[in-house]
Amino acid sequence: MRVLLTGTSGQVGAALRPLLQEQHTVLTPGRDAFDLSRPETLSARLDALAPDLIINPAAYTAVDKAEDEAALAFVINGDAPAAMARWAAARGVPMVHISTDYVFDGSGDRAWREDDPTGPLSVYGRSKLAGESAVRSAGGPHLVVRTAWVYAAKGANFMRTMIRLASERDSLRVVSDQWGTPTTARTIASVLVEILARREADLSDVFARANGLIHLTNSGSTSWHGFASAIVEGLRTRGVPLKAAEVLPIATKDYPTKATRPANSRLDLTRLNEAYGLVPPAWERALAEELDAHLEVVGAALRQ
């Protein structure tokens, strides 16, 4: 199968690429050849690429910057997925689109279900909601995948920021009143590949089992402070020398940001389990694997 995979310089795209290449021909055009900021060009590019499946992890993800660049965020996160979805629907090509917990308003303290009302608090969240709505309304076979708190051993993310700051500062101050589930890009990739491998039915039927929409994170939940504390403790148990002696909890109001973050980003995984029989690993286990992978990357760099 010819799979068009966008965003391979990002965390989820980079994790998906090697797994997909084991079974499929993976098309990974660069930004110059497949520019999401120019959605009017995508139909012709898709005609030339002729994919049998589209997977779109690519997005404008600068959450705070989006408050000042709303037009660009909506083009990349809304108009570009819409253009891809229209092309795919007209040809019966299945499409997987990655979305986010930011489509919810973060109220309450239970995990969000797929059919809960949306209510994004930020430009980024509204632009991502526009994209997933366009994919769903295009009418083709699709699977929208909402995830949250994504990180990996490579790239710019919370884990790597905490690792750097813990080596530079005497203490860390981290928000403790925002809750969610740290989720590794490799977890997202491995679960998606397992879903795609269920070819006892056409992919349109596979996606229809979940009504075209699932939540996908690691299992369990914690706060950003809890996540940071686990990162620091994990490094210590691996013998990594750190400057930071403590991780202090702070309130969201003590760390103001331009864009409002959801206080509750927990995503309910029931539909993922009922539709596909899948239960992602606990976030603590996934973190341990990612810390090991990070240290392997650092060790390889030092050996060069």
Image (spheres, grey):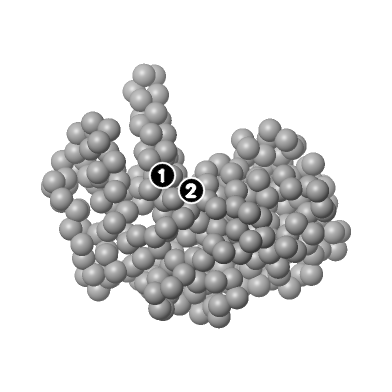
Circle 2 sits on which residue?
A: 281
Give left or right: position of 221 versus 276: left
Crowding at dot 2, Cα within 10 Å, few <14 / some 14-19 / many 20+, comes out as some
Residue drawn at (29%, 48%) of the image: 230
- On residue 127, which mark appears? none
- Which residue is most to the right? 91
Crowding at dot 1, Cα within 10 Å, few <14 / some 14-19 / many 20+, comes out as few
- Amino acid type shown at disc 1: Arg
Residue 67, position as x, y percentages in the image: 44, 71
Whole-angstrom CA distance, mark 2 to mark 1, is 7 Å
Q: Name the secondary structure under disc 1.
A: helix
Residue 204, position as x, y percentages in the image: 79, 59
Of residues 19 and 255, the one nearer the viewer is 19
Query: Considering only vertical position in the picture, is 269 above or below 199?
Result: below
Circle 1 sits on which residue?
A: 285
Give left or right: position of 137 versus 281: right
Query: Considering only vertical position in the picture, is 221 above or below 55?
Result: below
- Quadrant location, the N terminus: top right
Give left or right: position of 107 versus 168: right
Confirm or deny contact between disc 2 and disc 1 (CB under 8 A): yes
Residue drawn at (74%, 48%) of the image: 198
Query: Considering only vertical position in the picture, is 32 above or below 126?
Result: above
The image quadrant that residue 113 belongs to is bottom right
- Amino acid type shown at disc 2: Pro
- Quadrant location, the C terminus: top left
Give left or right: position of 254 versus 274: left
Query: Considering only vertical position in the picture, is 20 above or below 156?
Result: above
